Image (cartoon, helix red, strand yellow):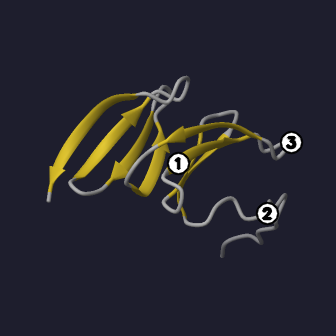
Amino acid sequence: MIGVLSVERSYPALGSHVCGMAWDGHYLWYADAGTDRLSCLDVHTGAILQEVACPEVRTGLTYDGTSLWQMAGHPKRIRVIDPADGHIVREIGLGE
């Protein structure tokens, strides 16, 4: 049996269509397909520390210790993003 989970903290709606979240060890990053942006949230203050334009954001977001990895569409691809400045380091095509 799994233990009982409890809510430690909640935040107002983060965006219009949040479709991916990743923890970088300090901050919570989330992808919003409604605004085509990645945002960095300070979970202690609730402040948005950084926003990065990310056209065609789709689903999924993860952090590998250095970069954010995010799915983009049309054509489908994976983007590797430098969280320090938001620039796309690499794109990996996945075909249609």
79 vs 18: above or below: above
Q: How far apart are the alpha carbons under marks 3 and 1?
A: 20 Å
> Between disc 3 and disc 1, whose residue precedes?
1
Residue 60 placement: quadrant: bottom left
Q: How far apart are the alpha carbons under marks 2 and 1?
A: 17 Å
x and y, in percent, of residue 1 in the image = 66, 76
Which disc is residue 45 wearing?
A: 3
Residue 43 placement: quadrant: top right
x and y, in percent, of residue 12 in the image = 79, 63
Question: At x 82% / y 47%, what residue is drawn?
Answer: 46
Type of the residue with mark 2: Pro
Residue beneath disc 1: 37
Neighbour class for label 3 at 10 Å: few (<14), some, many (≥20)?
Answer: few
What SS does tag 1 mark?
Answer: strand
Question: At x 18% / y 50%, what residue is drawn?
Answer: 94
Does 14 sit left or right of 56 as displayed? right
Q: Disc 3 or disc 1, which is closer to the eye?
A: 1
What SS does tag 2 mark?
Answer: loop
Q: Disc 2 or disc 1, which is closer to the eye?
A: 1
Residue 44 placement: quadrant: top right
73 vs 7: above or below: above
Question: At x 37% / y 34%, what residue is drawn?
Answer: 80
Residue beneath disc 2: 12
x and y, in percent, of residue 36 in the image = 48, 53
